[in-house]
Image: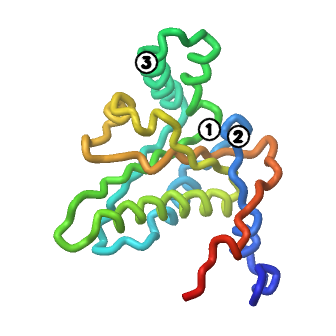
Amino acid sequence: MDTISDMPRNDTIDLLRVRRSVPPVNLDGPGPSAGELDAILTIAARVPDHGKLSPWRFLVIEGEARLRVGDTIGEAYAADHPEADAKRLDLERHRLAHAPLVVAVVSSAAPHVKIPEWEQVLSAGAVCMNLVVAANAAGFSTAWLTEWFAYDRRILDALGLDPREKLAGFIHVGRAREVPSDRPRPVLSDIVTRV
């Protein structure tokens, strides 16, 4: 099989062929129901996890919580950028307010006697991608982002992260108002080496 078109057709292949991130500003509600969200998160957690450590967890940010976290983001930005105008501060405050649901994936990778920390980090990345694929398969659109505030200790503290925890990403979930055209994808001959 030389190309994707040579593969047998099924829903999974069809989804992965066309899955596209949608900017959060283009995501509207309704978001997943409680049952849909539970199913999406259950699927997201089905990833390779050497040692069964579950070195990740989920923070569900929806409803008014999006604005409360946004206020913290805006305050941190304002403290670091006193020159910022009201428009920029409003943008920062609403970073998590566009999509009806944002799931923060928290990585708790740590030194372990048997399991390399790098494998734990990769497992958290796999959780993010499974979450994206599961949400898309359920009919939603997504964007997996970090942004500056995913690395800002003030924001991480406000979200209740342990000092050793990191954010693998914010997964914005909603209904696409507009799906952007596809971006250029890597040419296989540029990224594949046969040994």
Front in this rendered view, residue 142 or 86: 86
Residue at the far left in the pictured view? 113
* Front position in the image: 130 or 42: 130
**Residue 80, label in figure:** 3
Disc number placed over residue 90 in the picture, else none: none
From the top left corner, tell me how far across and down residue 2 is, in percent: 76, 86
Mark 1 burial class by Cα count in 10 Å: few <14, some 14-19, many 20+:
many
Q: Which residue was labeled with disc 2?
A: 27
59 with respect to 183 (left or right): left
Give the Cα separation between the discs numbered 1 and 2.
Answer: 8 Å
Residue 11: image x %, image y %?
Answer: 73, 74
Quarter of the rendering occupied by the C terminus = bottom right
**Nearest the eye: 193 or 16:** 193
Tell me the kind of residue under disc 1: Pro
Q: CA distance from mark 2 to mark 3?
A: 29 Å
At x 47% / y 20%, what residue is drawn? 77
Q: Residue at x 43, y 18 (%)?
A: 80
The amino acid type, in three-letter code, at marker 2 is: Leu
Residue assigned mark 1: 100
Q: Give above or below for 107 relative to 112.
A: above
In the image, is residue 65 above or below residue 3? above
**Residues tagged 3 and 1 counted as in contact (Cβ below 8 A):** no
Q: Position of residue 91 (x, y in %)?
A: 61, 22
